[in-house]
Image (cartoon, rainbow, N blue to C red):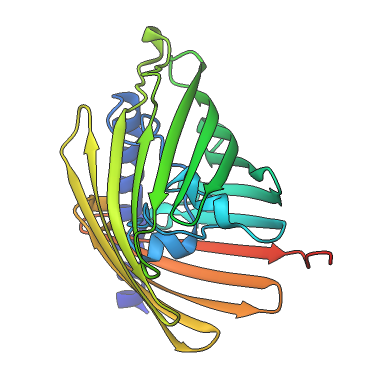
Amino acid sequence: MFSQFKISKGLRINKLIVILFLLFSIQNNAFLLSQDNLETDARESAMANSTVASAGSSHGFQNPAGTAFLSSTMAGIHFENLYQIPQLGNRGIVLGVPTKFGSFGLKGFYFGSVNYNKQKYTFNYARVFGDKLCAGISFNYFHSTLKTGYEEARTLAGEVGFIVLPTENLSIGCHVFNISNSDYNENSGQELPVYMKTGIAWQAEKFALTGQVQINKKENTSFSVGTEVYLVPDLAIRFGTSTVQQYNYTFGIGYKLTGINGNIAFARHPVLGFSYFLTLEYYFARKK
């Protein structure tokens, strides 16, 4: 009993230290609310977010061009928890609608808690051009609140992307975030990054291999790779690794039912430990 108490107490103390570290980092604009990467899902997280070149994405988180091949209307929900700390939760909703004029999407994400949070709302449009090219554009509204002396901050930013398919299984993608070089007001203590991602993906019926490089305007270049294997027709297992510390090592599984996709992922930070991600998507039957 005594040893169990000591272990439990130690875990609580360690978690308290982590929370205090994160709050200190937030106050000094070094960690969370300066980040834009609220959008992700469990499949992409399991592959270390290396999917900038993946064609056929239903939501275009890593590249707005990915939604161009959406074949039916879909709705999805996402939840993630960073480092198993309740105050560091991220939840979102996604809606995608294909039309003869291209695919349209709406997304909303809320990260944090009442005391500190960041919200992102996105309108996305993507379209296929011929058989070898698709392109997309997103318009984003950011709203950040940090109740430690900073004012609320708001800004608008755009992003563009394209995917080229030179062969049936190979695709090449590029994505530029914050093309207008937008930023929050100077008194907010926050910055909106500018970066470009480019990568390749090799996708077959039961296997996918992805890789990308991300070049930031003010940060170090990062590299990510991921893989996806379908062990049986509807069950996938995924792995990834990245030089971004939040996604050093990632893994997850996905399962498909009729009209429903469920995905779960885990990512390991070398110091702060594990984060987990859960995504559920429903695809409406297309009217004939």
Q: Quadrant of residue 210?
A: bottom left
Residue 231 visible in the picture = yes
- In which quadrant is the N terminus drawn? bottom left
* Above or below: residue 26 compared with residue 233: above
- In which quadrant is the C terminus drawn? bottom right
User: In the shown orientation, is residue 67 left or right of residue 52?
Assistant: right
- Nearest the viewer among 208 and 117 is 208
- Nearest the viewer among 29 and 165 is 165
Tell me what residue is drawn at x 64 percent, y 45 percent.
Answer: 102
Residue 242 image position (x, y, % from top left): 23, 57
The outermost residue toward the front is: 130
* Above or below: residue 125 compared with residue 193: below
Q: How many labels does the image show?
A: 0
Residue 200 image position (x, y, % from top left): 29, 58
Tell me what residue is drawn at x 37 percent, y 25 percent.
Answer: 192
Tell me what residue is drawn at x 57 percent, y 45 percent.
Answer: 127
Residue 21 visible in the picture = no
